[in-house]
Amino acid sequence: MRLKIFTADNMKAALTLVREALGDDAIIINNVEEDGKVKITAAIEIPAPKVNPRKAPKPKPKPSPVQRSLRELEQEDHTDSISLSYFLSHHGVEKPMMRRILETAASFDEERNINALAKALDIMFHFSPINNDFQNRPIMLVGPPGVGKTVTTAKLSSQAVLSGRTVRLINTDTIRTGGTAQLEGYAEVLKTSVIEAPEPDLLTAAIKTNKQSHELVIIDTMGYNPFDCDEMAELHHFIQAYNVEPVLVVAAGADPTEAQEIAETYMNLGVRRFIATRLDVARRYGSLLATAASMDLAFAGVGITPYLAKGIEQIDAISLARLLTRIPDRKIFVPQENDDIVEGEDHDIP
């Protein structure tokens, strides 16, 4: 691990220096204020070289999807000789929707399939990205358990801080073990604090007390079971407590039919946009189309990796088309059957 200290006039400038010097995978070890300056100690892992005397050195592997951004995913070349139906079928797009997409795409006179698909998606779906210049209406992230709401909260907060905005973090999830501690760890890096509001009556006070103009308020909530009426009623009370925008967070790779049912439930609570996470650990994105189409929800962004520096990336019709005309590699690690511990081989699975 390589350590380095960065000093700047403020947190935003210091984080920019860290990112420029060490890249997006840098780890913040410590940060202090001394004599009006912000001092950050950051580190980056330096992998040790592997030595295997029994085998010739292998070429450097292609970076795994978890280390790549949406832009890198989009830049992969695709063969127009493969039909769009093949890609859509792989991604689990249900047949009625696939038929509508293909019929709409066929109506455009385009040389490349991906361009026709992008135009069809632009007509059939809505794209409304969350960025750092939107109105001061608080954002409340909602969704089932385990979809990455807390990490998404931290990513949106980090992007806002880097753009010069003041952020207020509120957490209503005081039941889950470690939930507040995880968010407080992210908040410490951003030089802010987390306000706990375990009851709907406390949420209004948490939002309004000493609120600054142009302050971005992001609310992290507990994971609620969309098929449990009591839990959804509790979430509804939080949403009604103040004029917030509930934004649904979903994980890629889910069953499309179940994704549609989840979207329908949250739409009844006032959700109009959604963020998709975990695109790096999913090989099929049909559930994202099912989520958007079920109640006409707009794509608000995607999370490719769990790293905060990658942020929540914007997505539009062309980037969605590129994702849907890409079949991510599937590799299975196979250990060697001998007494020595050696590096396994990756086997491509179509």
Image (tube, rainbow, N blue to C red):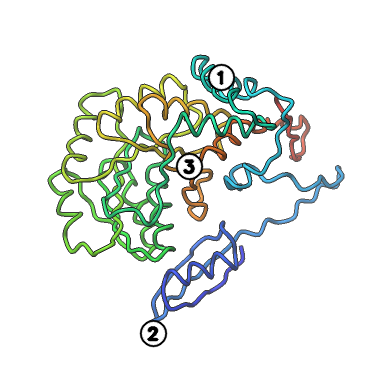
The first of marks 3 and 1 along the sequence is 1
Q: Nearer the viewer, mark 2 or mark 3?
A: 3
Mark 3 or mark 1, whichever is nearer to me: 1
Q: Which numbered disc flags the more N-terminal residue, 2 or 3?
A: 2
Residue 245 locus on image (x, y percent): 27, 43
Who is closer to the viewer here, 1 or 187?
A: 187
| 343 in relation to 285, above or below | below
Which three-letter amino acid code belongs to the residue tagged 1? Glu
Mark 2–mark 1 Cα distance, whole angstroms, equals 65 Å
Tell me the residue at 68%/46% (across/down). Answer: 63
State the mark number for residue 103.
Answer: 1
Which comes sooner in the sequence, label 2 or label 1? 2
* Quadrant location of the C terminus in the rendered image: top right
User: Which residue is at a point 30% across and 47% down the rendered structure image?
Assistant: 139
Mark 2 surroundings within 10 Å by alpha-carbon count, few (fewer than 14), some (14 through 19), many (20 or more): few
* 9 on left or right of 246: right
- The residue at which mark 3 appears reads as 302
In this rendering, would 198 be left or right of 253? left
Q: Is residue 153 above or below residue 162?
A: above
Where disc 2 sits, the SS reads: loop
Outermost residue toward the left in this view: 201
Whole-Å distance between the Cαs marked 3 and 1? 27 Å
- Asked where in the image residue 344 lies, by quadrant, the reply is top right
Amino acid beneath label 3: Val
Q: Considering depth in this image, is 107 or 159 the residue closer to the camera?
A: 107
Name the residue that disc number 2 marks. 35
Residue 318 placement: quadrant? top right
Residue 147's mark?
Answer: none
